[in-house]
Amino acid sequence: MNVSRETQLLQQFAVLLRKWNPAINLVSPNTVSEIESRHIEDSLQISAFAAGASDWTDIGSGGGLPGLVLAISRPALAVTLVESDQRKSAFLRTAIRELGLNNVRVICDRIEAVDPLGAANLSARALAPLPLLLSYAVRHLDPAGTAWLMKGKNWAPEVEQARVDWVFDVESYPSKTDPDAVILKIAGIKHV
Ligand SMILES: C[S@@+](CC[C@H](N)C(=O)[O-])C[C@H]1O[C@@H](n2cnc3c(N)ncnc32)[C@H](O)[C@@H]1O
């Protein structure tokens, strides 16, 4: 069987996540058996939105979800991962080296301490409530840029809460891996 480069790399990535998870908790231990079906498939949804994009910043990347999955599936995309935890950043750099990826870099620092990145696209998964995410996004997005935020079942009240302090345009895309979750496409973010 002819296995694609992407499939091979995603399989290798899953092996690395399982190897390192007991030491640094990259994903919740009770979801390790679902790394492919839950975490990688979920992250791959972001790839569909990256067609034609040239750069992408993923904040609070943890074990590389969705940022490393995106870098694997879109080899022409320049991906930046921002992660403050030193051990997780060490994992990300090891994975990048072992998978032979040359389109992704890691910034090991707090999102709010990193100089503005001027990103065209920004993603986050399981990072923070929407109002805080918008403050991160507005710091690191180009004014014409777009945030792609993976949110769980409380997404609608979070959008309402975020409107207290922020003006923005939002579209929601249902998640293919969780009936309660969505990917929020957010642009035009401005403080009230
Ligand atoms: C719950 S984990 C989610 C990781 C990954 N996005 C995922 O979906 O599996 C949140 C990650 O964000 C990182 N993080 C939290 N606050 C941060 C901040 N202010 N700056 C940088 N990284 C942060 C944590 O170290 C952690 O790895």
Image (cartoon, rainbow, N blue to C red):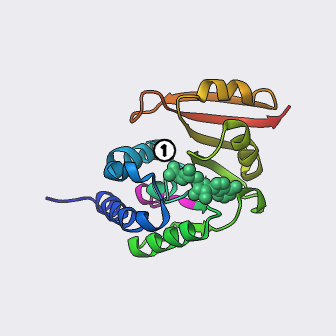
Considering every residue shown, the one lying at the far left of the view is: 1
Quarter holding residue 129: top right
- Give percent across and percent down for residue 191: 84, 36
Write the residue at 29% across / 62% down: 8
Q: Residues within 10 Å of mark 1 (few under 14, many from 20)?
A: many
The local secondary structure at tag 1 comes to: helix
| Vertical side of 49 occupied by 9: above or below | below
Judge by depth and name the residue closer to the eye, 34 or 54: 34
- Is residue 63 rendered magenta in the image? no
Write the residue at 33% across / 45% down: 37
Q: Quadrant of ligand 1?
A: bottom right
- Give percent across and percent down for residue 114: 75, 62
127 vs 189, left or right, is left
- Give percent across and percent down for residue 176: 39, 33
- Give percent across and percent down for residue 44: 42, 47
| Vertical side of 81 occupied by 130: above or below | above
User: Where does the N terminus fall, quadrant-wise?
Assistant: bottom left
Q: Which residue is mark 1?
A: 46
Write the residue at 62% across / 61% down: 83
> Which region is colored magenta?
71-79
Query: Is residue 137 in view?
Result: yes
139 vs 26, left or right, is right
User: Where does the C terminus fall, quadrant-wise?
Assistant: top right
Quarter holding residue 133: top right
145 vs 1, left or right, is right
Q: How many discs appear? A: 1
Write the residue at 71% across / 46% down: 137
| Vertical side of 69 occupied by 190: above or below | above
What amino acid is found at the position of numbered circle 1 in the picture?
A: Ile
Query: Is residue 59 in view?
Result: no
